[in-house]
Amino acid sequence: MLSFKNISLLLLGLVEWGIFLVLIMYKLFLFATLTETVFYSEGAFGFIKNIFLFLFYGQTFNYLRHDLVLVSFGFLTLSTFWILLFKRRIRIILLTIANGLLTLLIYADLIHYRYFGDFTSFAELTQLNQVRDVSDSIISLMEWKDLLFWIDLLIILPIVIFVLKKVTFPNADRKIFSALIFLFIGWFSLAQGMFQFYFDHGGKGIVDKMISDVTVYNHVGLLGYHYFDARRFFKDLYVSKKGISSKQKEQIIEFFRDKEPKINKETFGLMNGKNLIVVQVEALQDFVIGRKVSGIEITPFLNRLKEESMYFQNFFHQAGQGRTSDADFLANASLYPLSSGSVFVRFPSHSFQTMAKVLRENGYHTSVHHAFEAGFWNRNIVYPQWGYGDFYSKEDFQEGENIGWGLEDKEFLIQSVEQIPEAPFYSFLITLTSHHPYTMPEKHHKLNVNGINDALLRDYLQSIHYVDRALEEFVSVLKRKGLWDNSIVVFYGDHDAGILNEGEESGLFATEGSQNHIDFLLEKNKVPLFIHLPGNALAGTYDTYGGQVDLAPTLLHLLGVSTEEFYYIGEDLLFSENRHPVVFAGQEMTDGHVWYTPGDDSDFYKGKCYDIQSKQQVSVEACYTVYKQGVAETEISQNIIIGNWIGNRK
Ligand code: GP9
Ligand code: MN
């Protein structure tokens, strides 16, 4: 009977489930608000108003992606409708647990977003043991207002405990009928939202290429993103078991068959038999080079080094979510990293033509040094595979002063020199002191940064100033040991520091006051590259546009190892004609003439193209050639990685 009483009872039976849905939808909205993504600009009231207008008048708005709301609602309903099949007591317990778990996921995404600018991924969840090591960074990323995520649980938990203890529910309180209705509603919302995503917004392209996690989120919300991320993770697992398709194999072969050999004949083999020392410096960006604060140079040592070595002033980091590990992969394997997750984490056992492996085959001794947990980024699994004879990690270093994440760089670098194997050798060193959040004890603050308001920028500059001195001491030890004059010594930054905001104090500091968007784009990913050769050979400032992917061919060519037959995407930086583009994570790219920024899906024409010289936006067509090549290079890299191309060829 459809009496008033019956309807009321039905609704009452859905109360806790309804509350759960509202709370999680609210938290997803809160997430968007705090990260200033998608629909935040309308505020909560505007958001509700827009949903209302959409539901009753079919009006859609740019800022209200109705599919985004539908997908979130659909996922929530589909994943929890079955809870209605249980008796009320169990239902309440299950919903409370589901609320706790989803809150944890959304909150982890928030913290992740604050640091990395995107969300946690399935591949990272399998690496949760690393969380312990980053607890300091995580705490610094928390804010008081984040309590809004947890406050409902703080209120609900005592109520739940009370209700479960004191209240006896009637027996027949299962909601089979309601569960079925909501199964249908959930499925319908999800299907509707997904249809929109696939048909109206290029969803297939977005998910297939996974250009960026944020793009997926922009269309299908946080839960939708997690669904596609998990789907990709398991697909990868399957793909890497099975290998790549024969069409993809042909593409790889064709790509390298058509690739022009680019060797600078004058510099090839110039450093035959010399040692190679590569120092990857944590978060070192280029805007600090040559700059002063309160009349003091930020990097006095590197500024002097500029005169004695090759300094590339248009060199960029190309790391993605894998951060330090991506930079390491780019530099050592000359392939672009994955669009999501780290190669170290997702495919730690796959083979690559790494510099260590190649040089080892050429009679070099090889070592890698990093004073941190050996398991971080799976290094303990990856490095032996990559051809390093020795991996020196945290436990191999004697105790010294700890700053930030661990042993400070001076001690780290000096102790590393002791560990370096006998000549000829290749040693790869990864520094750590200048890691986010860049805080150091006061006594190490040697710059006067009083004129700067942005606390993070202040700490960053102090930290880089400190590292500059550490590098100076490192070089003086190399000189004392006679290594400076028979080694190629390389310094470069692993990735941006995550501190530059366009138009704000930090961004303006980096662009030296320029408000031009192009100036900001250029600075944000630029890292310095110094290649010092014995006798200051080839010293000078180079304009060539290049990135980390170009390091291995450049260095191997100097050492007289040809990479012509290698599956390397990079090109010798000393060969300056007709170069390939610099491609960034997220598929921005530049060739030094134009700069392409993609739109929010994979459609080339939705992107923006800028002319670097005139600093003006130009017709997107002007970026087409660069885009075509950049996308091809990225796809080839991904297939080589995922298909374990090098490993499977043996
Ligand atoms: C720690 C270091 C961390 O081992 O690699 O670097 P990150 O990837 O966080 O910049
Ligand atoms: Mn790093």
Image (tube, grey):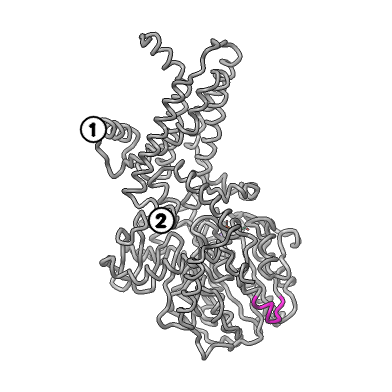
259 inside magenta stretch: no
Q: What residue span does the magenta drawing correspond to?
A: 358-365
Q: Residues within 10 Å of mark 1 (few under 14, many from 20)?
A: few
Residue 279 at least partly seen? no
Quadrant of residue 451 in the image? bottom left
Measured as percent of width and height from the top left, residue 436 is found at: 55, 55
Q: Residue at x 57, y 51 (%)?
A: 123
Q: Residue at x 51, y 71 (%)?
A: 549
151 in relation to 118, above or below:
above
Q: Residues within 10 Å of mark 2 (few under 14, many from 20)?
A: some
Quadrant of residue 556 in the image? bottom right
127 in relation to 304, above or below:
above
In this rendered view, identify the residue nearer to me: 458 or 253.
253
Quarter occupied by the N terminus:
top left
Q: Name the kind of residue labelled 2 in the image.
A: Asn
- Whether label 1 touches label 2, CB < 8 Å: no
Q: Name the kind of residue labelled 1 in the image.
A: Tyr
Residue at which label 1 appears: 57
Measured as percent of width and height from the top left, residue 421 is found at: 74, 75
